[in-house]
Image: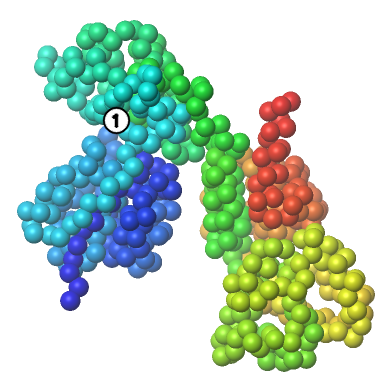
Amino acid sequence: MKQGKVYLVGAGPGDPGLITIKGLNCLKKADVVVYDRLIDDSLLELSPPNAEKIYVGKSAKYHALEQKDINQLLIKKAQEDKIVVRLKGGDPFVLGRGGEEAEALASSHIPFEIVPGVSSAIAVPAYAGIPVTHRRLASSFTVVTGHEATDKDKPSLAWDKLSTGDTLVILMAVGNLAPIVKQLLKNGRPVSTPIAIISQGTTQKQKTLIGTLETILAQAESFQQPAVVVIGEVVRLRDHLRWFDNLPLFGKRILVTRAHHQASSLSQLLREYGAIPIEIPAIKIQASPTSEELDQAILNLKNYHWLIFTSINGVETFFHRLYTLKLDARWLGNLRLGAIGPATAKALKSHGLSADYVPRTYTSRGFLSGLKRYDLTGCRFLLPRADIADRELVRGIARLGAQVHEVTAYQTVPDTKAIAKGKQMLRAGEIDIVTFTSSSTVTNLITTLSKDWQIINKAVIACIGPKTAATATKTGLRVDIIARNQTIPGLVEAIEQYFQERRIK
């Protein structure tokens, strides 16, 4: 019989990649996820689709639930024999009130586990290039809450001792920065002591302000929570050790227009380069209204010599129908397989098949150029692909003496709901770069924006290859970047090179 249990999981300070493997495993089996304000949405998507997600976040002015109510919620859900993941920012036991939640669970005899997380007290300074300890500068560090800093005669923190230590890390401190500085100076810290304020640490919106106890208050007015304050000589190492906000695309807001199920690979790579991916899929991939023609072609595969795939979507749609017909990869035994690009070839590989031919240049023209070495006279080609694909490939294969059966495997349609958000951000000038990974993403975004399509030109426009760029130019867009290597990594590298050249200039 299933028994309810609560996992108090530390999600890390912002970067979703900082959650532990054990924390991820807990998420993947959760019936209920109770989460805080600063949890990245991508973590919530790792829980089962049918998991109940309950927001209990707190800010300085608003609490979705009071702490006692959160405690009771965890107890109630566990008593319903559910696996509950209490997803908390940072580490549950470092100024996160996880101890209070564990006490409430223990008092109610609810089974629970603590899954430690990466504390913002360590991770945020590290992302700013500030080690909290250093052999020459600091042998210890102290973590305190800024909520306890007040002007009262007997503050609960021992400022006389805190002021004489090595590195001091203060969480939730921005609102009380003035009394904190006052207490440190009053208790002997020199006015020249370096101090860093790091806002939204470990995320691509991270900002770092450096000053001294003498100058920081005049500089810090624009900084808001969440922020971590670091005080001590280790702050001087930032200029030499800063790495995160030196990433080539740091802070660039990049519109990802790929279909939702394909956007993650591009978004992940952009994050590794420091960018902020905004996933606004310009297209949705959906099955063709009827699969009869594709099914018939699959059943008659023995009448073909070549099977050509131009995209991952074509591969996945084809094999979905193949398996639906109770067939498998053996049915393709006598065919030669062609794939335009390594990603498409990789998709074939996932079904146990290797492409016989992948061109060096991942375009229709490049594909046709390589086909010339084969004798195609009288060969029959099957080409399952999108409903809006152009005719260049079909005409080119026919000129080589072959017959081509083109069949619609899937449709690309505008994702109007998703585009509405992108339209608002483009109009406000909040997008730095718009990426197009296919001609269909261009045409669908243009169509959906209608008379407002020119707002795209407010941003830098990056295209995965010349064909996509030609479509964009034809519609009136100004193309700034065309990837030489027509892959997702090639597109990101081209964007990096574009901004690198402008920094040099």
Residue 111 image offset from top left, x and y in percent:
15, 60
Give the residue at x 38% y 36%.
Answer: 123
Q: Is residue 37 left or right of residue 252?
A: left
Q: Nearer the viewer, residue 273 or 207?
A: 273
**Residue 397 visible here:** yes
- Residue farthest along the left direction in this orientation: 107
Residue 206 image offset from top left, x and y in percent:
46, 33
Image quadrant assignment for residue 225: top left
Q: Secondary structure at mark 1?
A: strand
Give the residue at x 92% y 75%.
Answer: 400
- Residue density around tag 1, few if under 14, some if 14–19, many if 20 or more, within 10 Å: many
Residue 104 image offset from top left, x and y in percent:
11, 51
On screen, residue 414 above or below 18: below
Give the residue at x 59% y 53%.
Answer: 266
- Of the 4 image quadrants, the one containing the C terminus is top right
Q: Is residue 456 left or right of residue 399?
A: left
Q: Is residue 33 left or right of residue 304?
A: left
- Of the 4 image quadrants, the one containing the N terminus is bottom left
Q: Nearer the viewer, residue 21 or 323?
A: 21
Image quadrant assignment for residue 226: top left
Residue 113 image offset from top left, x and y in percent:
21, 55
Q: Count of labels shown?
A: 1
Give the residue at x 54% y 36%.
Answer: 251
Judging by the rendered image, the residue that carries numbered circle 1 is 171
On screen, residue 361 above or below 298: above
Type of amino acid at the residue the image marks with label 1: Leu
**Residue 387 visible here:** no
